[in-house]
């Protein structure tokens, strides 16, 4: 009997050690500086409220961490869209003026491999900027650094919350340098193929209710042939 | 008289116990790694695609949206008929001529397969009607519609971009409003029909010659 108990105890400790090793694995490193941060090209900078209750509308399956907003919005409960979220939000420029509207669809990705530190979400943005035109952004996002550095510490804390300052790039592809593929659909950016990157800054997170204070940012690198666009 | 070596037996027993514990740890690590490798963390539910071969080449697929039951959000500056109730559309004048709608989209079998956004905007430079269709298990489509409707109430537009399954495809998409004449109680007011025709992206002649 005591051997069985010892074995089960060992199994449990092994499992815990594995999870700890996964979360604190030094070989799963953040990518660091965004490639667009060191680009000489002109960029469009867009900021948006990343907390669902601060957006125009946000919905999911109704059973996830974040509550749908407004309260009476239709929920995505049907099986093919159950792991999808939809958010509409105001996009602001670098000077914090309203620049347009953005809609983001994000779905859990089957390419997720937690063993290699990839918690992948396939997402697309549709952004309409009345002064510039419309943009379609296709990206894969990796939330593993966020889970490791914000969500897990919040879950572990006795208050079930995390406060601090975390800034990270979410975009991990499909571009070779970990950038998103951006297509101009109308207006001055019509027909242009560009690269972009989405990052978030988080100041407060609750393991019970999700993001409490957070802002998102999208950088889109413009081709050199396009002049005259200001942030 | 034989005196049992109780101390020795105890030590041997503890050693075996310790070995069992360490074996448990190793197997626990292996089991956790194996489970994480073998069991998919995400398994998207797929509805079988209903794709037809188009008469002039390529493939076509039809989606529809039952109005109003599939409308997730309707926002415009008028604020009169916003969906859902309580939605606060930004009052900024930049968005005065922008109207955005979010929908659930259904396939030909009337099963929900994705979500979509339709944006209509009027501006001094150009008017815009854009669609983005997001099918979680497959990818997304981005289409720009010609604002002027064609005869029969159609609008047609070019598929400007796509992701994953649709990345390598181009083609066009049509939208059409079909009102429901049924007098059944609870029947939708009508539906928006979207028909996408996909063709592979054409390589330019110059590229093909270079390859040869």
Image (spheres, coloured by chain):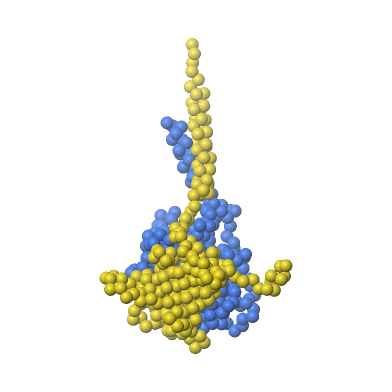
Chain colours: A blue, B yellow
Residue A146, position as x, y percentages in the image = 50, 60
Residue B56, position as x, y percentages in the image = 54, 72
Q: Is residue A40 left or right of residue A128?
A: right
Task: Place residue B183 in its image quadrant.
Answer: bottom left
The residue lying furthest to the top in this view is B1
Residue appearing at x 69%, y 71% in the figure: B207
Is any part of residue A199 visible from this angle? no
Residue appearing at x 52%, y 36% in the figure: B23
Using the image as rendered, state which of residue B149 and residue A229 is in the foreground.
B149
Residue appearing at x 49%, y 45% in the figure: A15
Is any part of residue A190 visible from this angle? yes
Using the image as rendered, state which of residue B192 and residue A23 is in the foreground.
B192
Using the image as rendered, state which of residue A177 and residue A193 is in the foreground.
A193
Residue appearing at x 41%, y 54% in the figure: A158
Task: Place residue B77 in its image quadrant.
Answer: bottom left
Residue A48, position as x, y percentages in the image = 47, 73
């Amino acid at each position: 009997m005591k051997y069985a108990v010892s074995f089960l105890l060992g199994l449990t400790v092994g499992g815990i050690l594995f999870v700890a090793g996964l979360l604190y694995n030094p070989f799963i490193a953040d990518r660091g500086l965004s490639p667009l941060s060191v680009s000489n090209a002109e960029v469009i900078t867009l900021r948006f409220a990343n907390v669902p209750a601060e957006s125009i509308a946000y919905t999911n399956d109704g059973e996830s961490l974040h509550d749908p907003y407004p309260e009476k919005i239709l929920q995505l409960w049907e099986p093919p869209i159950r792991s999808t979220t939809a958010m509409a939000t105001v996009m602001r420029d670098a000077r914090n003026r309203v620049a347009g509207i953005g809609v983001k669809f994000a779905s859990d990705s089957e390419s997720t491999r937690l063993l290699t530190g990839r918690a992948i979400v396939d997402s697309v943005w549709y952004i309409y900027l009345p002064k510039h035109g419309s943009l379609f952004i296709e990206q894969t996002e990796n939330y593993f650094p966020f889970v490791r550095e914000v969500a897990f510490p919040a879950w572990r804390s006795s208050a079930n919350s995390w406060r601090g300052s975390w800034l990270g790039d979410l975009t991990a592809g499909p571009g070779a340098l970990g950038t998103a593929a951006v297509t101009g659909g109308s207006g001055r950016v019509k027909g242009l193929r560009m690269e972009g990157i989405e990052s978030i800054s988080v100041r407060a997170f609750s393991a019970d209710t999700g993001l409490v204070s957070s802002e998102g940012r999208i950088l889109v690198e413009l081709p050199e042939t396009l002049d005259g666009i200001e942030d | 008289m034989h005196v049992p070596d109780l101390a020795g037996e105890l030590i041997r027993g503890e050693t075996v116990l310790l070995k069992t514990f360490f074996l448990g740890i190793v197997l626990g690590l292996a089991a956790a790694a194996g489970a994480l490798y073998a069991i998919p963390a995400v398994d998207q539910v797929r509805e079988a695609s209903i794709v037809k071969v188009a008469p002039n080449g390529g493939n076509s697929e039809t989606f529809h949206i039952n109005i109003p039951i599939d409308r997730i959000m309707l926002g415009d500056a008028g604020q009169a008929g916003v969906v859902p109730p309580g939605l606060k559309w930004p009052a900024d004048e930049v968005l005065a001529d922008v109207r955005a709608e979010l929908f659930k989209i259904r396939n030909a079998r009337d099963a929900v397969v994705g979500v979509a956004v339709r944006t209509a905007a009027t501006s001094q430079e150009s008017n815009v009607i854009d669609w983005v269709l997001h099918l979680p298990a497959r990818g997304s489509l981005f289409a720009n519609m010609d604002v002027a409707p064609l005869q029969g109430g159609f609008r047609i537009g070019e598929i400007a971009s796509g992701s994953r399954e649709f990345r390598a495809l181009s083609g066009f998409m049509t939208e059409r409003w079909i009102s429901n004449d049924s007098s059944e109680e609870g029947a939708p007011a009508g539906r928006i029909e979207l028909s996408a025709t996909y063709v592979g992206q054409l390589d330019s002649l110059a590229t093909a010659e270079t390859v040869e």
